[in-house]
Image (tube, rainbow, N blue to C red):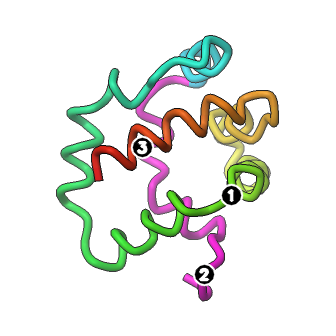
């Protein structure tokens, strides 16, 4: 982690969380501005409980990063990995969806 700025490498560590749901579902959830965290709460909770100190610090950084900056990194992640979930999450029209779900993750942490 380079200082206090999140990178694609930081996001890549959590790829399994981003791919819990297929891309068509993520897009549907995003269009409806759904609370995805509540639908996957047990899997997310399980993953959170297994984080080491470094991973907890990275998650904290992700949760504090501006949404526009996160979306820029999601766009970069899509270009590097071709994972469709990242392309969907990088779309500026889904900013509110991301804000809502990060808020729900903050409650779990």
Which residue range is magenta in the image? Answer: 1-22
Q: Which residue is mark 2?
A: 4
Identify the mark nearer the N-term, 2 or 1: 2
Numbered disc 3: secondary structure: helix
- Report the front residue among 64 and 20: 64
Q: Are marks 1 and 3 in contact (CB under 8 Å)?
A: no
State which tag comes first along the sequence, 2 or 3.
2
Q: Nearer the viewer, mark 1 or mark 3?
A: 1
State whether residue 38 is above or below residue 67: above
Q: Secondary structure at mark 1?
A: loop
64 relative to 66 in the view: left or right: left
The residue at which mark 1 appears reads as 66
Distance between the alpha carbons at the discs numbered 2 and 1 = 12 Å
Instruction: Return the residue at label 3.
Output: 17
Neighbor class of circle 3 (other Cα within 10 Å; few <14, some 14-19, many 20+) is some
Q: Is residue 40 left or right of residue 81?
A: left
Q: Position of residue 17 (x, y in %)?
A: 42, 43
Residue farthest bottom in this picture: 3
User: Callout 1 environment at 10 Å: few (<14), some (14 to 19), or many (20+)?
Assistant: few
Identified at 35% across, 79% down, the residue is 54
The quarter of the rendered structure image containing the N terminus is bottom right
Q: CA distance from mark 1 to mark 3?
A: 20 Å
Q: Is residue 1 above or below residue 44?
A: below
Q: Quadrant of residue 44?
A: top left
Q: Is residue 42 magenta?
A: no
């Amino acid at each position: 982690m380079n200082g206090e700025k999140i990178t694609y490498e930081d996001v890549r560590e959590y790829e399994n969380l981003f791919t819990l749901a297929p891309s068509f579902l993520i897009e549907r959830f995003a269009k409806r501005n759904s609370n995805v965290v509540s639908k996957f709460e047990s899997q997310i909770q399980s993953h959170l409980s297994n984080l080491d100190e470094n991973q907890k610090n990275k998650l904290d950084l992700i949760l504090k990063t501006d949404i526009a900056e996160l979306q820029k990194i999601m766009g970069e992640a899509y270009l590097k990995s071709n994972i469709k979930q990242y392309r969907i999450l990088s779309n500026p029209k889904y900013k509110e969806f991301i804000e809502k779900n990060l808020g729900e993750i903050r409650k779990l942490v």
